[in-house]
Amino acid sequence: MEQLAECPAESDLAGRASVCEGCPGQALCQSQGRIDPDQEMIDIRMNVIKHKILVISGKGGVGKSTVGCMLAQVLASQSCKVGVVDLDICGPSIPKLLSVEEQVVVNTEYGWKTLLSPHNGIKVMSVGAMLKSDRDSVVFRGPRKTGLIKRFFKDTFWGKLDFLICDTPPGTSDEHLTAIKVLKNVKPDGAIIVTTSQGVSIATVRREVNFCRKMGVKILGLVVNMSTFVCPCCDEVTNIFPEDEIEKLSEEQKIPILARIPIDMRVTSCCEVGRNPVIEHPDSQAIKCMEQLVKSLYNIINR
């Protein structure tokens, strides 16, 4: 049986292996052995940010961006200076979730000025702010995605932050490879893997775990989203998916489950229209779980 060869982008064979023939990013990979002229500026920008955390998922639709935004909102509510960089080039949803849809990116003498969310002043950068309409599609090949992501780190004037949350698209592709490569020198804290507890989602999480370990990215833990449903009338909690598989994965891979976040219709309604659920529904079980996630993260990254 013929096996699919892996991309050698992070090896000495990048751009030179037989599998690279015909790849639109071949020329870019061939040049990676040379000194990247952008790396020095990226390192300067990123070194003044205390913590860099990647939010990733194996599958789409598990609520990764929502979890990333709520993480940023909880941190900001605790007086942290927080930024969110939207690395999902083809499907940016951060501008809506953080209510910066009407803002545009402005180029200044210090670099691109971040979008400023009304949610406790969270700084945001996203390709969504560079489109004329939210109906416009982004049709970029790999090298152009790579170039834009590098500019998000190099050209954006983030300033001094406590946390930079990097929201990535589902899977393991150009966006992930680029982010990991440009952040390598500044040692990001690691990645949070967001999943649901259904079997189909967990199967892809195993691949995500394998990817992180191959790339040398520390896995901070798993976040099980949509684990239960909270009735909006009586607050009764109902399990939606079986929990056996996620427990098995956690034990098997020795990765802690940092939080189990329920579906709460009040929180969902806030996120849909770009309001801040941390401020509007602080008593929500989902928000309490997010606050527990933040405590767990502090314990891990401050070890």
Image (spheres, rainbow, N blue to C red):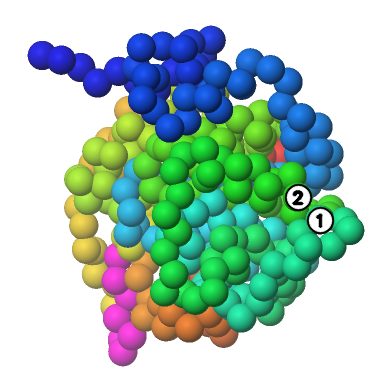
Q: Secondary structure at mark 2?
A: loop
Report the quarter where the C terminus lies.
top right
Identified at 26% across, 47% down, the residue is: 201
Left/right of residue 265 with respect to residue 47 in the rendered view: left
Q: CA distance from mark 1 to mark 2?
A: 5 Å
Picture coordinates of residue 7 (x, y %)? 39, 22
Picture coordinates of residue 207 (x, y %)? 33, 32
Q: Which residue is mark 2?
A: 155
Q: Which sits in the foreground, 46 or 290? A: 46
Identified at 44% across, 18% down, the residue is: 8
Q: Which sits in the foreground, 272 or 36? A: 36
- Pointers 1 and 2 in contact (C-beta within 8 Å): yes
Amino acid residing under circle 1 = Gly
105 relative to 172, above or below: below
In the rendered image, is residue 243 in sight? no
Q: Secondary structure at mark 1?
A: strand
In the rendered image, is residue 96 in sight? yes
Amino acid residing under circle 2 = Asp
273 relative to 175, above or below: below
Q: Which residue is mark 1?
A: 111
Left/right of residue 58 with respect to residue 275 in the rendered view: left
